[in-house]
Image (spheres, rainbow, N blue to C red):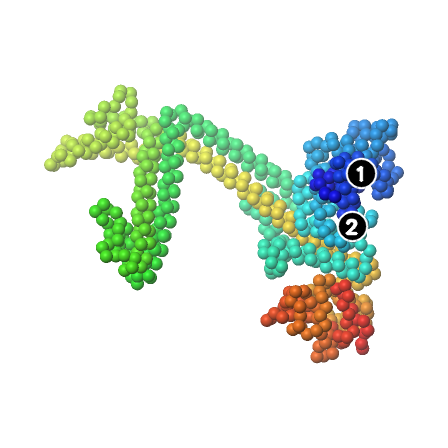
Amino acid sequence: MAIVTAHVNAVQQLYVAYFNRPADTAGLDYWTNVVETQKGSTAAVSAAFAAEAEYKTAYANMTNAQVVNQVYQNLFGRPAEAAGQAYWADLMTAGKITIDKVVAEIAKGAQTTDAEAYENKVAGATAFSAALDTKPEQDGYRGAEANKVAKAFISSITTDASLTAAIAPTALSATVVKVVAAGTPFTLTSGLAAVDAAKEAKFEFLDSADGKDDGKVAAGTEAGITTKQNTAFTEVETKGGVVGYAAATSPNVRAALVADKVAANAAQLSTANTAVADATAEIGKVAGLSAAVATQASAKAAVDAAGKTVTAADADLQAKEASYNVLSKAAVDVAGDGTVDGVIVLNADKKLVLATGVTETTNPGVTALLNASIAKEAADLALSNANKVKTAADANVNYLDMTATEVSNLETIKGLMKDVKVADGALPTMAQIATQKAILQANADLEATPGAATAALNAFNSALTTYEGNAPVNARVAALDTANAQVKTANDAITALTKATDALTKATVAADQLKALDATIKAAEDAFETNGMSKPVDAEGSLLATAASDIYVASDVDASINLFGLLGKDSLFIGTDYTLNTGKLTAGNDNVLEAFIVANATGGTDIVLETSKFGSNAATPEVITITLTGVASTDVVLNNGIITVNTPTV
């Protein structure tokens, strides 16, 4: 029967509501099909859940009020409010409603944070059920102990942040390992499998954390996670500007310090924005100044863009020049006007062209050099023109945003303007000033020797110089520039704090995941002692077996174990991925990971484990070797990934 996503979600909702745990694989499949058969109705499933032994056990000896409260806890992660609790409990006591209807109605009425919590719990349950993607995992999720761990997982989820943390791949994998371990009867095989799964989860996490996902863990990756967290912690203060953060020991104090800084940044930005608005209003009071300021900004942007083009064109020209010198075995230099002596010249139209007789055949690389030179000259011209436009725009702003001194300077200039008429009560425009200056210059040029005309020109230029010296003082524009700079400073502070706190959150999540993985490994190893067995030891370096039944786990380095299986019933776990090969190392199967049991020259046994499927046949063998000193190869047995000694030889 086809499975509808909405129906799967509905079943997960009921599991969360009634049992406070994710659905197990078999239950999810079965009840989803029931919902499908009922055309989407969950009434039958809800009623069935209310009659389940698991439900009855969980709610045994509870009053109706307590039952309602537990439903609230399951759905929303909080106690029921008094009014709601009394309302539903009274209806149940009066026999007017059954628990399945109560669950449905409470869930349907969820709002705001309650709705968020319920949705997130269901999302977490869905992710957990999907993560049970192997039969051992599916079989392991059963029984009260497994359910207890699964319930703790669902209970930890309420907010979006808690959901994200709970279903992060590493965290979710660790939860699955814990649940399966809790639900699987402990045996040597299951215990070793749990250790192996926990270590594999950590390996996959570190493999991803080093940024490569290449099946290897780069040196320093694990230590680097802690280092990143420490660095990020410090940078909340050094880069985010939260004074006192690094010295604070209380999470609540640190949170308060960050909140204060966020508020301070917001206030700073608000003040700066107000200053921008005020400065803009002042500029708007002067006719034409707003437009002039906008034109000035555009002109500056054009100059900046043209400057970048010149830089790029110059770099390209230098590269083409170097290439040309190599290809043509020459040592030319491009002149300031773009020409190259005897190679690139200016024609009658002042355009750069190849000199007569120069072709790509005679001068390899010359075409690229010519084009680069033309592009550089065009870029230079564009920059020059952009600067002229900016100079005019600056002058217009200077003219409009005048101080009292500048007004006085222009009045002086107006008094010297005898040829260009300026209206009474008006100040001369920049165009009028330019026209008058041109007339005075022409008159002075007509004098054979400096006379009255030259004196008039000099007086005019002196007055103009005085004005131009004062003109750059633009109080209104300066106020706007200052306010805009303050806005940038405030925004930069906000961005810096956001980046710093985000980096710390990310680093902390990674560090917490690593701690959780280590805790899972420790729990899997401690389970051996809890069940009366020796704790597993990584097979690394030289080891000496004891009189106890020692348990060793193959690692990624060579090892030797003396007295293995001679004093106690020892075990060496190599993993269930290996296929036994009793032949020669050079006769391996390149399609599977193989374990070779080989008699060595000293009477012991070498366990040779491939680290790649073709490891034994690689030019440099990709294997690890674990030597069992004093153990005959004929006594060594491999079963379910565990090596033991069948009949000890002394």
| Residue located farthest toward the right when viewing the structure as drawn | 61
In this view, the residue farthest toward the front is: 1
**Residue, disc 1:** 45
Q: Is mark 2 on a helix, strand or loop?
A: loop
How many circles with numbers are drawn on the protein?
2
* Of callouts 2 and 1, the N-terminal one: 1
Which disc number belongs to residue 141? 2
Please, what is the three-letter code of the amino acid marked with disc 2?
A: Tyr
* Quadrant location, the C terminus: bottom right
Pinpoint residue 431: horizontal percent, then vertical percent.
27, 29
Q: In which quarter of the image is residue 626?
A: bottom right
What x and y, as percent, mark residue 320?
A: 34, 55
> In the image, residue 476 lies at what x, y percent?
40, 30
401 lies left or right of 68: left
Whether residue 23 can be seen here: no
Could you tell me which residue is drawn at 58 percent across and 37 percent down? 262
